[in-house]
Image (cartoon, rainbow, N blue to C red):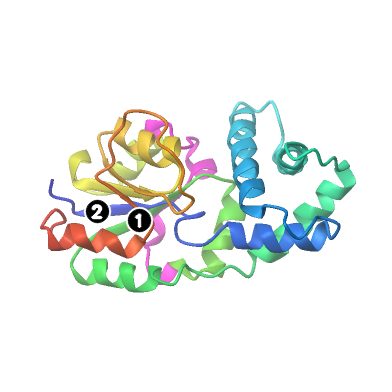
Amino acid sequence: MNITTIFFDLDDTLHDHQKPFAHALRSSFSYLPEEFQIDLAYKRLRYHSDVLWKEYVSQSIGLYDLRLQRIVLALRDFDIEISKDQAALFQEQYEKELSRITLIPEVPSLLHTLKENGIQIGLITNGPVQHQKNKIDALRLHEYFSPELMIISDGVGFAKPDPRIFYEAASRIEDHPEQILYVGDTWHNDVVGPISAGWHSVWYNLRKRSPETEHKPVLVTEDLSSILSLLELGLIKQ
């Protein structure tokens, strides 16, 4: 393995997506008990978001309805019923919280070190173009990634785990698929997808999930900076 380019996922990889969710949830539903397990609620939100995303891609549901339905369904999993109006207020607060996101602490040093060692880096994220661009701006990711290597699914017409979004990314660089590594937190999108496109994958498993298929990432980690161990082992080209 001779990696020369690394693409990263955005949400829950470069920034903590659960933190703005937690703040918005507590702000919007103050009646939730103190012991309410926000981490589990967040996992259910992500689950329902992924399920509904397939309907959004097939144009059977609109983006705004997706955002309202996912919180309704996530809380219903805990026997908590909310109205559409309550879901809308939550979504409004959630978007405010997302405008204040920051990079995970080890990310700036990691990206700088990779670039200093001649590794090309890029970004692939699912989502609406403007919504994801707002996050990119809030995180000042233009300081690390060139515009042509920041790929948003709605902008290219394919969403992870569809291998075509990885083919599109590969077409923008000169590397062969086996020279590209993808780093992300979601099993199907960030492990199965890139491996299906002939890439290698690192699974950033901060939420301590279980593998869902037999695919084999080259590294499973809860610390992004451990990617540098691949550099030290000579698996990433210097």
* Label 1 crowd bin: few (<14), some (14–19), many (20+), radius 10 Å: many
Quadrant for the N terminus, please.
top left
Cα–Cα gap, marks 2 and 1: 8 Å
The residue at the far front in this view is: 35
Quadrant for the C terminus, please.
bottom left
Residue 18: quarter of image: bottom right
- Picture coordinates of residue 79 (x, y %)? 80, 38
Residue 48: quarter of image: top right
* Label 2 crowd bin: few (<14), some (14–19), many (20+), radius 10 Å: many
Q: Residue at x 44, y 72 (%)?
A: 105
The number of discs equals 2
Residue of label 1: 122
Residue type at numbered disc 1 = Gly
Magenta stretch holds residue 150: yes
Q: Is residue 209 left or right of residue 68?
A: left
- Picture coordinates of residue 42 (x, y %)? 63, 49
First of labels 2, 1 by sequence position: 2
Q: Residue at x 77, y 37 (%)?
A: 76
Secondary structure, mark 2, is strand
Residue of label 2: 5
Mark 1 and mark 2 in contact (Cβ < 8 Å)? yes
- Picture coordinates of residue 185 (x, y %)? 44, 48
Range shown magenta? 142-164
Residue nearest the observer in this picture, 121 or 16:
16
Magenta stretch holds residue 192: no
Residue type at numbered disc 2 = Thr
Q: Is residue 153 left or right of residue 128?
A: left
Residue 166: quarter of image: top left
- Picture coordinates of residue 229 (x, y %)? 20, 61
